Amino acid sequence: MLCTALLAACGGSSGNPAPKVDAAQATLDRALGAKATSIERARISADVRLDPQGLLKVGGPLVLHVKGPFAAPRGRTPARFDLAFVTTLGGDDFKGSAISTGRRSYLQLDDRVYALDAGRRRARAAPKSHPGLKSLGIDPLHWVKNVKDEGRDDVGGVATTHLAGDVDSAALLADLAALLDKAGGTASFLTPRLLAQIGDAVKSAKVDIWTGAGDDIVRRVAVDLRFAFKPAQSPIVGLDGGRLRLGVTLADVNGARVRVATPAGAQPLTDLTGPGGLRALLAGLGTGLTGGIAGGAIELVSCVTGAAGSSVELVRCIAHLSP
């Protein structure tokens, strides 16, 4: 009786207490869950940097920077974007752009433009809502865990809540594989076996996410992975381990309408890569990285050095490595 009275006086309950909702996780759910505000369009700035250990260290870091406007798929209208990129390999910069008008897709390399889908209409997207970062094909809610609130920050003039957490590397790699598969297939590149080997090599994986303090829209995501393969067991030739950093920043979210003009003078990509097109390019890259053919890594290095900063020559060479 006394215990019951004391509990009642203190506002307690003799039953099980209701589970406490973690504030940081609740913020993440609002930013990435089913009720998240849709990102219809934005200006993207994305960076990928690999600081390798092993023979690949000789060529210095591998860096990719991408920036430009993006409009998410809406209803039956495919994505539109005009994303300029610069890739640093072996000390040389390779430049180009990935372009989609919503009807056709193009790849600009140096001063030449190639049509990725010449001679056929682009497949229409199925009607679907794409909340939050899912509009970009990214779903961190599946691979972020142990999230914590790190306070407030400014991202591009927007007040944000800074969240930090750990990464489920296997789930992240699965997302990456799905994205690459949509781009043209990964059968000879990110195979399930290779993904498992890479996942096993991850020693630490952290993520930082900045969401708008007033609207819970994601403004920036940064992932930092450190990995090391067991001696003589690396699936990627010349790569023993290293550090991989990825960052995506979104500006002018749901702002100005994205208009992408059709490039003039486009040639079929197959003129450059051969019959395989984009799939041949990815297959050739996979062959060089994973040693799919004898001397594949040496041939890949030869492609990079021989291209001497020409994106056209680099793509041509890598595509012809495909088995």
Image: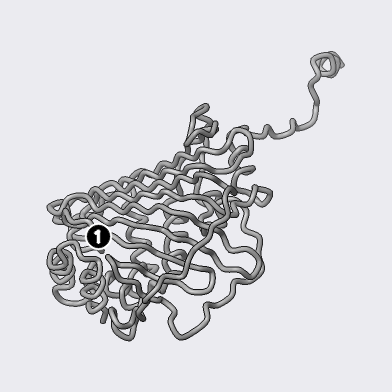
State the image coordinates of residue 83 (x, y, percent, origin top left): 41, 58
Q: How busy is the neighbourhood of tag 1: few (under 14 within 10 Å), some, or many (20 plus)?
A: many
* 1 or 271, nearer to the observer: 271
43 sits to left or right of 8: left
* 102 or 299, nearer to the observer: 102
State the image coordinates of residue 159 (x, y, percent, origin top left): 54, 31
Element type at mark 1? strand
State the image coordinates of residue 184 (x, y, percent, origin top left): 41, 73
* 308 or 147, nearer to the observer: 308
Q: Residue at x 42, y 64 (%)?
A: 177
25 sits to left or right of 51: right
Give the vertical position of 91 relative to 283 (above or below).
Answer: above
Give the vertical position of 262 relative to 218 (above or below).
Answer: below
Q: Amino acid at mark 1?
A: Phe
Quadrant of image for the C terminus: bottom left
Q: Residue at x 20, y 65 (%)?
A: 310
* 131 or 194, nearer to the observer: 131
State the image coordinates of residue 305 (x, y, percent, origin top left): 13, 64
Name the image colouring: one colour
Quadrant of image for the N terminus: top right
Quarter-of-image position of residue 179: bottom left
Residue to which mark 1 is pinned:
94
Q: How many marks?
A: 1
121 sits to left or right of 323: right
Give the vertical position of 244 relative to 117 (above or below).
Answer: above
Q: Residue at x 56, y 46 (%)?
A: 253
Quarter-of-image position of residue 29: top right
Quarter-of-image position of residue 258: bottom right
Q: Residue at x 60, y 44 (%)?
A: 31
